[in-house]
Image (cartoon, helix red, strand yellow):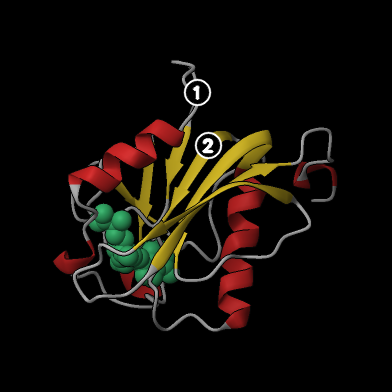
């Protein structure tokens, strides 16, 4: 996909880069299983995960993609990491983006979500909430860990 076709909600800035302490914390939330497949979208310049996607790839190992319309199969990942742009996403964008994360997560899989808001979903339950107050702009945000309900039908059943 051509980058210019992807509507970037907010362009990448280095200030968004997670500090090592946050990367370490997020790594600790991920499944221990070595075979677990992890998606990171939007990845920014993070190196966490096996498949990294962003509208503006910061390195060659990051694929171009739109977090609002992921070109990935349903129920593909054991865990999904997401740090969407905190500005510029209205209610519908937030809902649409979280829907995409749920869609690509396996039933029973985890979503580790970093934002100042907590998405509501009928597909996932909250496992834990962690407040962050270490942002350089002084913003408070939350890392919420969700589990996709096991036993629920996957989107593959509806597509
Ligand atoms: C908060 S930053 C992620 C920072 C990341 N946690 C890090 O450590 O570098 C948000 C990212 O969303 C990306 N982005 C904006 N709109 C997007 C879209 N429609 N699809 C995919 N990525 C998008 C930006 O390019 C930016 O890299």
Choose between 149 and 101: the one closer to the eye.
149
Choose between 147 and 34: the one closer to the eye.
147
* Image coordinates for residue 37, horizontal then vertical, percent: 48, 28
Q: Residue at x 69, y 42 (%)?
A: 148
Image side of residue 54 versus residue 13, left or right: right
Mark 2 touches mark 1? (CB < 8 Å): yes
Residue under pointer 1: 36
Q: Residue furthest top?
A: 34
* Image coordinates for residue 81, horizontal then vertical, percent: 45, 47
Image side of residue 56 versus residue 26, left or right: left
Q: Quadrant of ligand 1?
A: bottom left
Q: Name which quarter of the figure residue 100 lies in.
A: bottom right
* Image coordinates for residue 136, horizontal then vertical, percent: 19, 70
Q: Secondary structure at mark 2?
A: strand
Q: Residue at x 63, y 70 (%)?
A: 95
Choose between 139 and 2: the one closer to the eye.
139
Vertical comparison of 67 with 47: above or below = below
Residue under pointer 2: 79
Q: Residue at x 78, y 42 (%)?
A: 154
Please tell me how many numbered marks the rendered image carries. 2
The residue at label 2 has a CB less than 8 Å from ligand 1: no
Dot 2 crowding, Cα within 10 Å, few <14, some 14–19, many 20+? many
Q: Is residue 58 visible?
A: yes
Q: Residue at x 84, y 43 (%)?
A: 157
- Real-space Cα separation, disc 2 to disc 1, in angstroms: 7 Å
Q: Is residue 49 visible?
A: no
Image side of residue 57 versus residue 54, left or right: left
Choose between 26 and 63: the one closer to the eye.
26
Q: Secondary structure at mark 1?
A: loop
Q: Name which quarter of the figure residue 116 lies in.
A: bottom left
In which quadrant is the N terminus drawn? bottom left
Q: Name which quarter of the figure residue 48 lies in.
A: top left
């Amino acid at each position: 996909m051509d980058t210019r076709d992807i509507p970037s909600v907010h362009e990448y800035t280095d200030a968004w880069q997670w500090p090592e302490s946050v990367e370490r914390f997020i790594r600790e939330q991920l499944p221990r299983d070595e075979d677990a497949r992890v998606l990171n979208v939007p990845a920014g310049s993070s190196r966490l995960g096996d498949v990294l996607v962003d509208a503006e790839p910061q390195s060659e190992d990051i694929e171009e993609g739109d977090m609002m319309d992921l070109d990935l199969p349903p129920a593909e990942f054991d865990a999904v990491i997401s740090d969407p742009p905190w500005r510029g996403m209205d209610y519908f964008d937030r809902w649409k983006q979280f829907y995409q994360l749920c869609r690509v997560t396996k039933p029973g899989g985890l979503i580790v979500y970093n934002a100042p808001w907590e998405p509501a979903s009928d597909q996932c339950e909250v496992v834990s909430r962690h407040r962050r107050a270490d942002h350089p702009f002084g913003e408070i945000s939350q890392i919420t860990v969700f589990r996709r309900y096991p036993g629920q039908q996957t989107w593959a059943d509806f597509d």
